[in-house]
Image: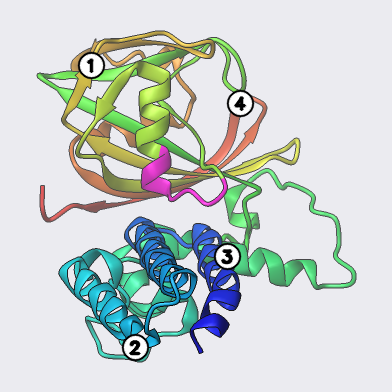
Amino acid sequence: MLKLLADNYLWFLIFILVLNMTQRKYAHTQKKRIATIYLATLLMVFNILVVVILTKELNHYLAWPAFGLILIIGYVFRDRAWPFKMHCVKCGKKLDFDHIFGCDDNLCVDCLDEKYPEEAEKRKEKEAKKAKKNVIEEEPFICPDTVEEIDWDIWEAEEHCVLSYVIKDGKILLIDKKQGMGTGLVNGPGGHIELEETAIEAAYREFNEETGLTASNLEYRGKLRFQFKGGVSMIGLVYFGTEAEGELKSSEETTPFWCDVKEMPYDKMWEDDKLWLPRAIEGEKFDGVFIFDDETMLSQKITFEKDEDK
């Protein structure tokens, strides 16, 4: 029996490592990914003990104390080695495979969507886009001139981005864009959401890359949807914060600078900014749709909602 375990140990290890690699596609799964490494380590230690018993031709019953030792170690480090739950910790619903081995929160899809609304919207948009690809024939999109001519409920964006604004001591951190889309304009730090990266993770990363500072308390404030006459479609999720530490550093794409909130350079910014940014600074949440022809705004519609927590 011990020889059989030793001979097949590698297959068990491969299974655990494949599971660990699979977990990469799930957001918020760092704790469970580390747990699979703990499990692989415990399995390796047990296999070493089994090999010693076989090599030294010791009594095979010694495998039981060895197994007990592994269980004790696993129990001591149980919070790290076994964070997996079979049921949602909030509503009790049975979890599927993806959410048992992925998602450190141990929440079902509905509870996850409630906790991370912006990520839920992003996921639904991806699902809608995937479903759209299954359509055999589709009429080519012709961008209209007004936002009323687009059904924004089924509209899909090709690009997903973030913008992050930090306001501290009456000043707001902005950037001069030196290359890429919007070259020559003033904007907030931001950029594209990378594959397998959440929106808030992208917000912190882009903020750091474009300013050299590290933000610590970014919160979701609103959504911007842009349709360009040239065909580009984009969603921008906007975050606000009040804390950032470090030293300002320019990058190849941007030059960051602090600006008095009362002296915002709207004349040097995208045309839509002056329509929603002042009220967003005051704490209002918003949802805006826009049609642009290059850098010229043709049509817009913005709705606001005051943040009760502000």
Q: Secondary structure at mark 1?
A: strand
Q: Which residue is mark 3?
A: 18
Q: Residue 142: tell me if it is visible.
A: yes
> Magenta region: which residues?
195-202
The tag earlier along the polypeptide, 4 or 3, is 3
Q: CA distance from mark 4 to mark 1?
A: 36 Å
Q: Are marks 2 and 1 in contact (CB under 8 Å)?
A: no
* Residue 298 location (% of width, % of height): 60, 35
Badge 1 amino acid: Gly
Badge 4 amino acid: Thr
* Residue 124 location (% of width, % of height): 53, 68
| Disc 1 packing (10 Å; few <14; some 14–19; many ≥20) | few
| Disc 2 packing (10 Å; few <14; some 14–19; many ≥20) | few
Q: Residue 85: tell me if it is visible.
A: no
Q: Is residue 166 left or right of residue 49?
A: left
Q: Is residue 100 above or below residue 305?
A: below
Q: Are marks 3 and 2 in contact (CB under 8 Å)?
A: no
Q: Secondary structure at mark 4?
A: strand
Q: Is residue 183 left or right of residue 74?
A: right
Q: Which residue is mark 1?
A: 246
The tag earlier along the polypeptide, 2 or 1, is 2
Q: Residue at x 66, y 48 (%)?
A: 158
Picture disc at residue 61: 2
Q: Quadrant of residue 80?
A: bottom left
